Image: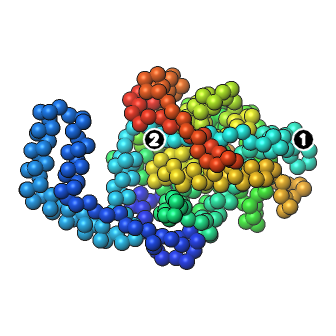
Amino acid sequence: MSFQPDKKDWSVPASPKALWKHQHTLPRLPVPDLGQTLVRYLQSVRPLVTDEQFARTVKAVSDFAVSGQGEELQRRLKKRAEEKQHTSWLVEWWNQIAYLTDRGPVVFYVSYFFGFKPFPSSLLREPPIGGGTANAQCNVAAAIVEHALNFKQMLQDETCSPDFVGKSAQCMAVYPLLFNACRIPTLPSDVVATYNPHTHSHILVARRGRFFRLEVLDAAGRRLSPQALAHQLKRVIEEADRQGPAGCGIGALTSWGRDEWARARRLLAARGGANEEALEAIQSASLVVCLDHDAGPDVSTRARQYWHGDGTNRFYDKTLQWIVLPDGRAGFLGEHAISDGGPCLRVNQYILQSIFKKPSLSSSSSPSSFPPLHFRHYIPPPFPFSSHHPLPHLDLASSLRRAERREGRGAERVGGERGSAVCLRLPSKIHDKAGLKK
C-alpha cells in the first residue's frame, strides 16, 4: 500500500499564490496561562459531579498546581508552540483525540451530511449527445463531478481564494487534504491517507454495493466532458444492475467499530492481489459518487439516505462522498477526520452555484461523438472471515429511529439563495450502537 501513516505537516510556507495570500497574517493560537487553565477545568467539571466529588477534584487540582508538574508541563507546551511557528500547537492533538483515536463507528457519530435543494428541470431532462432518454441521476452526478473537479483543480493550481469570516482571513491548510483522501482503520489509532492528486485522477462510483474506478482523463490527459461523464455513469448503472446487489460488500465494513474494521481490513489486505488493488483504488480516488437505486419520497427519508443509506453503497471512510438518487435529488456525506464542515460547505456551495448558474452539461468543447471509454469494475473482495470474525449485520434505519426517539433532531438551512444546502445536525450524544449486530 502506498499510504504512509506519518503525521500531517500542517505548516504552510510563505507563498504569493492566492490560496495562501493571507496565511502569514493569521494570528497564532496562544498558550493559555496555567492558572487560567486550572480554573477553567474546575468550572467545566463542576456541573458534572457531586459536591463530594468536586471537593476531591479541587484538592487534586491544588496539589497539581504546587507540585511542580504543572509548571513543567506548561514549559513543554510553550516550547512546542515556539517550535510550530507556521501552524498550531493543538491541531495534531485535536485530530488524534477528537477523531482518530475514537474507536466508535464513524457513521452516526462522526459523519455529517448536506441535502441539496432540487436542481433545475433543464438539467434533469437534458438528453444525452446523439439522442435518447434523459437520465436525471447521471446528469446531476456528472454535473457534480465536473464542478467538484474544477474546485480540485483550483486547489492544485493554488488559485482558490481564501476564506473570510467577516473581515478576518481563515486558515486554508486543510483544503489541499480534502480530495484524494481517506481515513484508514489502524490500531490503536486511525490515520488519514492523502494521495498525490496529479497521479491519482480517477473517481470512485458506487452502485448496489459495487465499486467502479472511473478515469476522468482521456488518453491525451484531457478531462472528460460532462456529457462523457454522464455516459460513463450510465454504463456503471447498467453493469451494476445487471449483476445485482453485492450483498454485504466492503462498504458495509466501514460502518463497523474502528477496531473491528481495522482487523477485518488487515485480513483483506493480507490476501494481496485483487484485494490490495481494490482497497488502494478506493482510498486514492479523488472523490466518491454513490448512485443509489432507491429514491427517497420525503425529506426525512432522503436525509437518511444522505447520512447512511443502506449501509452498503457507501465507503464511509472517504472524505468527500456525493449521493445522487434516481430522480436527480442529491446530497453530500463527509468524513470528519481532518476535514471540517466549513471547507466542505464551501466546496458544495461552489458546486451548487456553478450548476444553478448554468444548469446544463453542454460545452463548446464537447465532442459530438465519444471514443470508447473504459471503467474498471471492482467486485467486493473476498472476505476471509471465520466463524470467529462474522460480517456485521446492518440494521441502520431501526437504530436511527431509536436514536431519534430518544434524542430528537434539528435542522438548519445553510447557504445562499441559489444553490443552498440543508444540513441536518444531530445532537452529539447518541448512545445507541450503529446497528451492527453479530
Up-down relation of residue 303 to residue 3 (above or below): above
- Residue 319 is at least partly visible in this image: yes
Up-down relation of residue 285 to residue 254 (above or below): below
- 150 and 407: which is toward the camera: 407
Identity of the residue drawn at 68% across and 26% down? 297
Density class for disc 1 (Cα within 10 Å; few <14, some 14-19, many ≥20) is few
SS at mark 2 in the image: loop
- 113 and 6: which is toward the camera: 113
253 with respect to 54 (left or right): right
Mark 1 or mark 2, earlier in chain: 2
Type of amino acid under label 2: Val
Verify CB contact (< 8 Å) between mark 1 and mark 2: no
Residue ID for mark 2: 110
Where residue 245 appears, as percent x and y from the top left, is 65, 30
202 with respect to 368 (left or right): left
Residue 132: assigned label: 1
Type of amino acid under label 1: Gly
- Residue 379 is at least partly visible in this image: no
Up-down relation of residue 60 to residue 208 (above or below): below
Where residue 345 appears, as percent x and y from the top left, is 57, 50
> Outermost residue toward the front?
166
Identity of the residue drawn at 26% across and 60% down? 32
Density class for disc 2 (Cα within 10 Å; few <14, some 14-19, many ≥20) is some
Where residue 87 appears, as percent x and y from the top left, is 39, 67
352 with respect to 62 (left or right): right
SS at mark 1 in the image: loop
Up-down relation of residue 407 to residue 419 (above or below): above
- 233 and 359: which is toward the camera: 359
